[in-house]
Image (cartoon, helix red, strand yellow):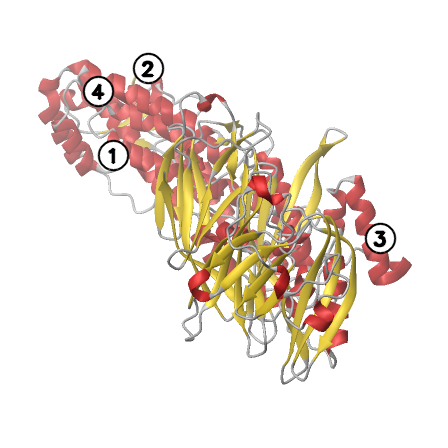
Amino acid sequence: MEYFLPFLPDLFLKVLNMSITASYVIIFVMAARLLLKKAPKIFSYFLWSVVLFRLICPFSFTSAFSILKVFFHGSRSMDHIPNQIGMMAQPRMETGPDQVNAMINGSLPAAAVPYSGANPMEMIMFALSLIWVIGMMILVVYGVSSYFLLKRKVSTGMLLKDNVFESEKIAAPFVLGIIRPRIYLPLGLSETEKSFILKHEQTHIRRFDYIIKPFAFLVLCIHWFNPIVWISFVLMSRDMEMSCDEQVIKELGTEIKKDYSASLLSLAVNRGMISGSPLSFGETGVKGRITNVLNYRRPALWVIVAAIILVAAMVIGLSGNPDAITDNEGKKMQLAETWAESLRTRDGKPRYEIMSESMKEKFVAGQIQRAGDDWNYNIGGSSPWVESFTIDVEGNTANITYHLADSGGGKYEQTEIITFGREDNRLVVIDAREQIAEWERVNSFAPTALQAAQDYIKALKESNYLSILSWSHDHPFDPMGQEIWDTVKIRDVKIIQEDVRENKACFWLEMDIEEGGTSAFEKGVSPRWLWLVKGEHGWYVEGLMTGGPSTDDWYLTGNQPAKEISIADLTEKSIITSDRFEFTDYPLIAELPQEDIYLYGMKPTGVVLKYGDDMQLFNWIYTTPRFILPVLNKQDLDHDGRDEIVCVLNVNSGSGVAIDELHVLKQAGTPGYIDYIFSDYLEQIKTMLSPDYDKKENSILLKTNNKSYTYDMPAGYEEYTFKNIAYGNIVYFEAENGLKIKVPIGLAFEEMAEPQFFEDTPIFEGDVVFKNGKFQITNPHITIE
């Protein structure tokens, strides 16, 4: 016994997992019985075989036709409760729907304090396994003793013929025996009743029901803790008896239905306890059996065919476990669960074992940096800690959402994306990236403007989005921000000039960008102006812009043209054309004559804004291969009573490319204008626009906030593999009456290098609101032009 006890919880868990799976199978079988109401009961009786299979077989197979995928997704071994649940830091089980899992997992006891003793869950599981064994033994003893007591009771019965006996000590007929089954009849039966009863009991013997029912009772003893299994045993017994009744009626003729029903009623047995034996003629739901006998008619052929199809579908659909969408999806789910559980327990060793070799090297380097040469696979932090997690596997990635808590009662969420790949013919994790959560954001301050600028520049060079956010207090949070910055490589940032005043500062930067990635940065060396403000706690960043202050004395230093510019040089009176451009020093490229505002170009780049008797230089691009000139407008965008100058520049044009740049020039109380550029529109669109691809209909549902539009792909493109929507190569801004943005949406296919734009390509449109120096897209919607 002492050798058996350590294995008892594992055995109980195996039975418990089988019982949970069987419970869902029983629910489907019970539903199918309703559909088979008018079919012969032999079909309902046969359905219980799949329940029996699920209750006794510790393994199964995966099938694409499994009906259980309604409750369970991915290829599973149906281990709803993991074997290591007793050792988990936070016990967790997967019993089916997410709502049920959340309710059950929320009630499980938390882990024991390290080194304080056994885990409470481990003790609970051991106690439950003992209770299970005791209950099982009680039922088995009851069943066996009932069998032998009854056998002793009828031992004096008189043989009538063959295996038929008669006894004065019984009130109802039944079959008793396993190896050599015998039929026992009570005294006083008429010959008609005897013929009914013998035909009924002989049908039981012919179908081996005398073995099936005791075996089913033995299985019930094993799963005695599951009330759904008790219900299934009762329903199976009823179907067994009803199918025998129907077989008798079928063989002897429908004219005996009334006499047969009378015999059932007169020999009805009221058993107080469910048992595996004997098979009694008047036992199990007599009222329902009588109703079934009286209503029995030979079924139509279509009923038989429909019943065969339904039963076959249920047996096939309930015997196998859900198959994965792809062969590896079940394995990916297992790896993702291992990865997430490691963070919950703060034990990085299971993670290490499923990493690629390159990830292992990074992991070890990080451990040494964190804990020195005596590192011990410890990961995560003590607060906040992981309470639970959810996993969504899609393709070669898994999104893990961790639900965190801290000692102060705070609740948080953290998302991690892991990527799968194959190494040495083994599925491993090849990459893992945490998405920054907004609760991680902090506000940083510096005692001087220079220190704030230097720390911000350091964050830029490191592409550290969280650090950049800590200095840019008013910048909107983007959960995908770090992913965007991971594509950016900034080789160097130099401070060319600084202008620090009492509560505001501007630093002229020269940025050497190696890779702009998916950000608004362009590759190469270009100027930027870093604006800072001084708040109650110190200096922080207001924004990084393409335009600086209007103070000519330092703004032009190192950036002025070959000769000094004065208003007298700006003599052009008509908008430039491509044929005159080469012969004009300062071409007039846009104008608002009624406002006395003119925009002149410098060569090779840069512009001069002339307003009245003043002028200001900006480092703008205004020449493109297609010679699309800027558009000027003036209007009060932020409704502060003062008009802003709006300029739309075409900064890139060519085959498949047409990109506008939106600038708003605003007076800030000092001479000149501050230049605000709308640079994060792609990031904003990403949060507003999402596609749903319907392969069957060859269409895409484009959703923008609460609006949606279905776009049907052109004929012939269903042959290609749709990857995603694509946008950003073509961007238009309009400034005629308010600000608007228009971005055509292309379709990306695996087989094509470039996104495809069609004649009826959908266009993302929205209004652009400018306020407090920030741009925001509103009223997003989809149109077709």
Q: Nearer the viewer, mark 1 or mark 3?
A: 3
In the foreground, 588 or 571: 571
Query: Residue beneath label 4, please?
Result: 303
Residue 733 horizontal/vertical position (percent)? 47, 51
Sequence-wise first label, 2 or 3: 2
Sequence-wise first label, 2 or 1: 1
Q: Label 2 to label 1, Cα distance in Å?
A: 40 Å
Residue drawn at 12 percent across, 18 percent down: 254
Answer yes or no: is residue 107 visible. no
Q: Tag 2: residue type?
A: Asp
Q: Nearer the viewer, mark 4 or mark 2?
A: 4
Residue 58 horizontal/vertical position (percent)? 55, 35
Sequence-wise first label, 3 or 4: 4
Contact, mark 1 vs mark 4 (Cβ under 8 Å): no
Disc 2 on helix, strand or loop? loop
Query: Residue beneath label 3, please?
Result: 365
Contact, mark 3 vs mark 4 (Cβ under 8 Å): no
Query: Residue beneath label 2, please?
Result: 162
Q: Tag 3: residue type?
A: Ala
Residue drawn at 44 percent across, 32 percent down: 52
Q: Tag 4: residue type?
A: Val
Sequence-wise first label, 1 or 3: 1
In the foreground, 579 or 205: 579
In the foreground, 581 or 616: 581
Sequence-wise first label, 4 or 2: 2
Q: Label 1 to label 3, Cα distance in Å?
A: 62 Å
Answer yes or no: is residue 742 visible. yes
